[in-house]
Image (cartoon, rainbow, N blue to C red):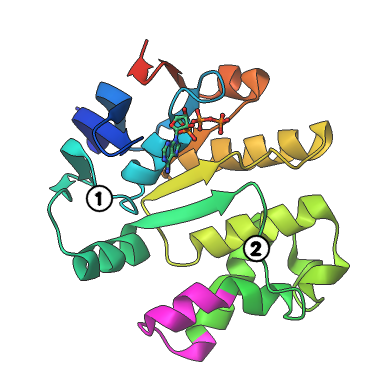
Amino acid sequence: MNSIALKAENINKYFSTTENEKFQVLKDVSFQVNKGEFASIIGKSGCGKSTLLYILSTMDTDYEGFLYLNEQRVTGNSQNKLAAFRNEYLGFVFQFHYLLPDFTCLKNVMIPALRLQKKTREEIEYNAYEKLKILGLEEQALKSASRISGGQQQRVAIARALINEPAIIMGDEPTGNLDTKNTAIVFDIFKQLSSEFQKTIITVTHDNDFANKSDRIIEMSDGKII
Ligand SMILES: Nc1ncnc2c1ncn2[C@@H]1O[C@H](COP(=O)(O)OP(=O)(O)OP(=O)(O)O)[C@@H](O)[C@H]1O
């Protein structure tokens, strides 16, 4: 049987509008994603995708319902415990790469591992090179992040998301800023990460072609999964 990487159980989320009114943005959202599955969350603007991803990423803890990641219940854990959990199990790729422009690509990839302080600097450097190699960027390793193309920058950001060997990679419009060619490259990387390396990928996207090619589409409408 497939093991479950992520399970959302009856998630409700409200935002306060005025003093006495609440607006329900997520309505009884339940679904699960298996280990190694590549899932895309789609739906019209304003349907609640980013709000959901923010909860799934453990960054937002103000919701009703339960969230399980890597077969552990994370709902109700302290902020410190959640931060440690994120460092160990989750990798993030955003629409904008947020690389440090004056640092080399290699250093950018190393930063999350240096912060974790679990390996020696030499080991981390070796691992960062390996990640850049998987992404076809060994020749860019020693260039500053500001001196490579947009597509390459996004691949460095993916390498950085992989450095701590997360079980789950979450993407918020990871191809939103890329042209067709680079979108296809990023798609193929995610596909490879899921099929070859058993990483679970959960990504919000506006790109229906991208979503259609992924293993699984989670479609939302007006705060619900449809
Ligand atoms: N902090 C907030 N306070 C109040 N309402 C919010 C807040 N954040 C989001 N909303 C509302 O919740 C709804 C869902 O927003 P969300 O950003 O999750 O949608 P989305 O599907 O990700 O949209 P998009 O595709 O445009 O990014 C929207 O109506 C939005 O206006």
**Which numbered mark, 1 or 2, is in the foreground of this view?**
1
User: Which range of residues does the magenta coloring cover?
Assistant: 110-122
Which residue lies under the disc numbered 1? 61
**To which quarter of the image does residue 184 belong?**
top right
* Left or right: residue 104 compared with residue 36: right
> What type is the residue that disc 1 sits on?
Thr
Q: Main secondary structure of the magenta part?
A: helix
Q: Please indicate, yes or no, whether residue 2 appears anywhere in the rendered image.
A: no
Q: Is 121 one of the magenta-colored residues?
A: yes
> What type is the residue that disc 2 sits on?
Tyr
First reached walking from the N terminus: tag 1 or tag 2: 1
Q: Residue at x 24, y 46 (%)?
A: 62
Examine the rendered structure and indicate whether residue 6 appears above or below residue 206: below
Q: Please indicate, yes or no, whether residue 107 appears anywhere in the rendered image.
A: yes
Which residue lies under the disc numbered 2? 98
Examine the rendered structure and indicate whether residue 32 appears above or below residue 160: above
* Left or right: residue 79 compared with residue 49: left
